[in-house]
Amino acid sequence: MSQSVATHEVRKNQIQDPFWSEYIRLVREVMVPYQWEALNDRIPGAEPSHAIHNFKIAAGLEQGEFYGMVFQDSDVAKWLEAAAYLIEEKRDPVLEKVVDGVIDIIVKAQREDGYLNTYFTLKEPGREWSNLAECHELYCAGHMIEAGTAYYKATGKRKLLDAVSRFADYIDTVFGQEPGKLKGYDGHQEIELALVKLYHATGNEKYLNLSRYFLDQRGEKPHYFEQEWEKRGRGLHFPQLSMVHDHQYSQSHLPVREQGKAEGHAVRLVYMCTAMADIAAETGDAGMLAACCELWDNIVNKRMYITGGIGSMEQGESFTADYDLPGDLAYAETCASVGLIFFAKRMLRLHQDSKYADVMERALYNTVISGMSLDGTKFFYVNPLEVYPEVLGKNKNYNHVKAERQGWFSCACCPPNVSRLLASLGQYVYTVQDASIYVQLYIGGQMEAVINGASVRIEQQSLYISEGKSRFIITPEQTSEFTLALRLPEWCDQAEVTVDGGNKTYFAGDKNGYIELTREWKPGEEVEISFSMPVQIMKSHPQVRQTFSKVALQRGPFVYCMEQVDNGKGLYQLQLPRKTEFMISEQMGSPGGVKVIRAIGQRMKPTEEWADELYRSDSLWSMEPAELKFIPYFTWANRGIGEMTVWIQEATDE
Amino acid sequence: MSQSVATHEVRKNQIQDPFWSEYIRLVREVMVPYQWEALNDRIPGAEPSHAIHNFKIAAGLEQGEFYGMVFQDSDVAKWLEAAAYLIEEKRDPVLEKVVDGVIDIIVKAQREDGYLNTYFTLKEPGREWSNLAECHELYCAGHMIEAGTAYYKATGKRKLLDAVSRFADYIDTVFGQEPGKLKGYDGHQEIELALVKLYHATGNEKYLNLSRYFLDQRGEKPHYFEQEWEKRGRGLHFPQLSMVHDHQYSQSHLPVREQGKAEGHAVRLVYMCTAMADIAAETGDAGMLAACCELWDNIVNKRMYITGGIGSMEQGESFTADYDLPGDLAYAETCASVGLIFFAKRMLRLHQDSKYADVMERALYNTVISGMSLDGTKFFYVNPLEVYPEVLGKNKNYNHVKAERQGWFSCACCPPNVSRLLASLGQYVYTVQDASIYVQLYIGGQMEAVINGASVRIEQQSLYISEGKSRFIITPEQTSEFTLALRLPEWCDQAEVTVDGGNKTYFAGDKNGYIELTREWKPGEEVEISFSMPVQIMKSHPQVRQTFSKVALQRGPFVYCMEQVDNGKGLYQLQLPRKTEFMISEQMGSPGGVKVIRAIGQRMKPTEEWADELYRSDSLWSMEPAELKFIPYFTWANRGIGEMTVWIQEATDE
């Protein structure tokens, strides 16, 4: 591994946190076992997955036919990756045996030449690489590569790593600039970021170059998807979609360096950006870095919901336009926020700037965990900011919106994406650059890093979400000088810091948003940081028409919302005065000390009953005091079906 | 004609009106000639219609193949109907000769047995009546029947009337309860209302009974569309739509008497309701009448835009749910408002209640004429109440919304529907019941009625839209007693009335909303009525979440809107104070003395520039005075592309 020679790096971080440990337990005890049953078609009533069967048939171990989506293999790969992270976090011989068994099957299903894809092997042999626009062939390869590298990192076992390396070697013989090779790239970006992981795991630069090739080729003219479409006689797998001709959908409308704006399918865009940032970091490609920064800014400053959700429309699961952020029609796919976190993590490798971690936090604490129920058995694919259940099923613009989480999806991308992110959450808490350890997230656990070639352990004890506090016990191998850089979250102007029992000191962040503590650290020294967590009344940019004159509440990392069960029907009738006092309290049965917010607001009502008239000119309205209750957005829809809104009308009366 | 024996009826009404005559001139001089060219494929650059060619080929006069939609014939029929109304209004030998020529071709295209439909005759012979759900076969028949009756009424010429009667006779042999007959009905209602017109034109009750049969059969179980789908081997003409299985779409989900709520395709619903009201009036069917009233109330009290538009979503061009009235996503098809006027006219035959004429006025003065440009050459199919052009083409939820009127549509339903309504507008101004003449609309012209078997002429001189006034010169054959009932519009509490130069008297309406003047009328007596026309600040029902805390302006029959060209960009940032003074003035170049409204409002602005941040907690906002200008909704989008909104945020500051 190329990483093993680094003099500065995070080695390991095992999470122990009053809030997040429960999520990781759910992944380990509920989601990963449940998904294993699903992959094996043992969930009564659920649509069969057939994904394991497909591999067994391709391996010659079973008879039968391929069943499922063209990208069905990726469900197995994402499950393997999540399982690998769990094993890395805590060895688990039972799970490891299951994983080894699956890997044996997968390797048997691999062709002699390295090719591995059950859909084409079983259903369309001979038509490999004929429809990159639609068939997710390299996408599936990418997920298997991610699984292979994760399992190798967790266990040191090479079987899957070697298999995916052979596959990548084969892919490298198929694609490239050389005469006779295909000049293509996948419709759904994924292999690009996976090949960088494979490069890190093996040190083989071929994989890095192949990743870069795919990125460089994207959007070149003549357009590859059009060419291959002509070549295969204009056949389509998904005639109802426009994967071949809508180039913006797959971010192939322009070369990646020239895109500038976040267009098309949101998940594909952030997966692509993740790889672009990787390539920029690995190769020092300034054009690629500039493109990453431009796309980041466009997403975060113009096209992101306050919950960290991205994708403003269902059509194409896509971005729409700058400042176009409808709350009720939002797509805000859980997977897209997972991908945004991948992108943020790569940007933090390039620039130690807290703005990337701020977005990571926003997406993680809001949209990502909104994506699952508090018991880990139900999931949102789409994460709206405003729901009126009465119109769902009637107004078809809301066909993608659900008022309650669902058990499993036929296109089951989001639950395993949440699993693999949460199972690997330890990787997102710290970054190391030179002799500085950056605390990006205040999530408790045991971290081991290498600084100046020497080991440093840091135990973080976090009461971040409940009390705005975190304590660090710093244990270098021996006393040594380095910097502990503590992120000052964007919702906080300054923090109170105590180093080794000394006086409390107030710090504002430096220009990059960190409080840098540089000293000779002795083993066992402690740092405490404390943030005040007032309720913040958030406004959106004046060009966001959908939320104009509305406000949203934030406290700490959480965005809040109102539900009908607490506030009655007609949430749009409620207003929050500009000056108001907020009362903070515990919520019964809520995870990890999450608080609710109460305030006295008002409900606008007509002074007399409206009978049947739809429109009146002579109506009088008045304000009636209303006790408002706000809960963290991620906890919505855990108490039955009802209205929900993040944004509330601001009262202009003082 | 059955009507010729009536002792009370409106015989004729020729419009002469400072506002509407110009529209009728546009129909006569621009729209009908243009559409004739279009039907003959002589519009350079436009998609060919081929509709006349189809008839010529079916008539054996030309060689070739059918081209166009399954309902292409109806474009010819609607054009004929509009031409007939123009000829009825003013004989026009040139136009009449063209019409006679078309009728000759149509009659040659009719089969021996009476069947007449070029699509099935040319393209699917032998498959007639096999796909009523999708193929508009009876719908096309209905439009041809309407054309035949209109031309007979206009000219006394029977050729087309006889042809469509033979066709209706043939249809009567195909459909019915008797063994061996089909138990079906058309997916798109239209023939039901047409058969009532044919009954009126011929006096043959068979046609009335057939109309009633189609209505009674609709929504019966087992479902006809499912049965015929099975019978024809499950073939579909429009697989991308759900015309066969989505029964609500075509109002065939329940028997018509049990529907109660306005569901599905809005045009189909109002065409159906029109026929239902006809049947209730002709047969005294109390159940049918109750169903009409229930559907009327549901549309008007729960599902109608303030502009008289109906249909809240593009999917299925359909209604959605009670109080679900998004302005930006509105479908509000021009044709649907035309159909709503048809329905209102039939309800006025049943009940002399001004509420029906109020809706007729609302739809006519706002959505219907919004549907065409001020020069009669461009058209809106969809009539939104709020448009932000920057997101059009990017956010695909707005794919149906255009920021400017279009030249012609491949599905060219709206322009000819506007033509035939405007060309027959004289029929909507008065109704007669017993010895009362009701003035439903204040549109100037020369009317002839029969009251107690004697002729009465009324000349209306209207300055309704400019000054809120109208004058009536009443000329009975000889002095006779009858009632002149003047509608008090819903936007007016009382009117000032002067009878024959006497004193001014103020009247409120009676319980049905009319000012009834009953007296011995001497020839040449005059009545003047004057309405005050203050600007009205309209609010919508508190359950309409999309317009909550917003207001719209109305003055007289017109709903107003703001455009970017007058008010700057960011219309959602503007607010109208509760108490404000309105200034009324002429608009340069506007038709018929239409006024614009000005008021001092305010624009909500951040006190400091927002840089890149999308969300901020520390932002301060202030109000800046803004001169607001409102124009009548129907005149929007005549000055280039820009933002538009009907509803504006109400300022709660006093």
Image (cartoon, coloured by chain):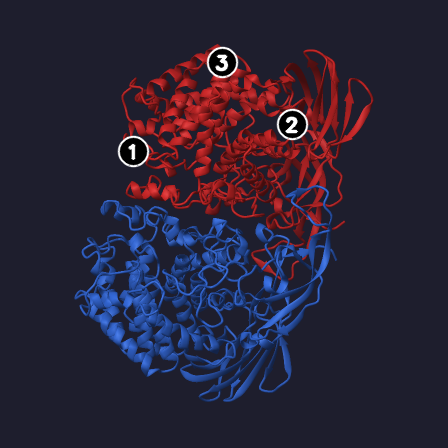
Chain colours: A red, B blue
- Which numbered disc flags the more N-terminal residue, 3 or 2? 3
Q: Is residue A282 above or below residue A609?
A: above
- State which chain disc 1 sits on: A
The type of residue carrying mark 2 is: Gln
Q: Secondary structure at mark 2?
A: loop
**Residue at far front of view:** A179
Mark 2 and mark 1 residues within 8 Å of each other at the beta carbon: no
Q: Secondary structure at mark 3?
A: helix
The residue that label 2 is drawn on is A440
Q: Which is more toward the observer, B595 or B309?
A: B595
Question: Does residue A414 appear anywhere in the picture?
Answer: yes
Quadrant assignment, res A64: top left
Number of the label disc, if any, that sits on residue B56 = none
Number of the label disc, if any, that sits on residue A155 = 3
Task: Please state, as top left, top right, bottom left or bottom right, where the C terminus of chain B lies in the image.
Answer: bottom right
The residue that label 1 is drawn on is A127
Q: Which is more toward the observer, A634 or A8?
A: A8
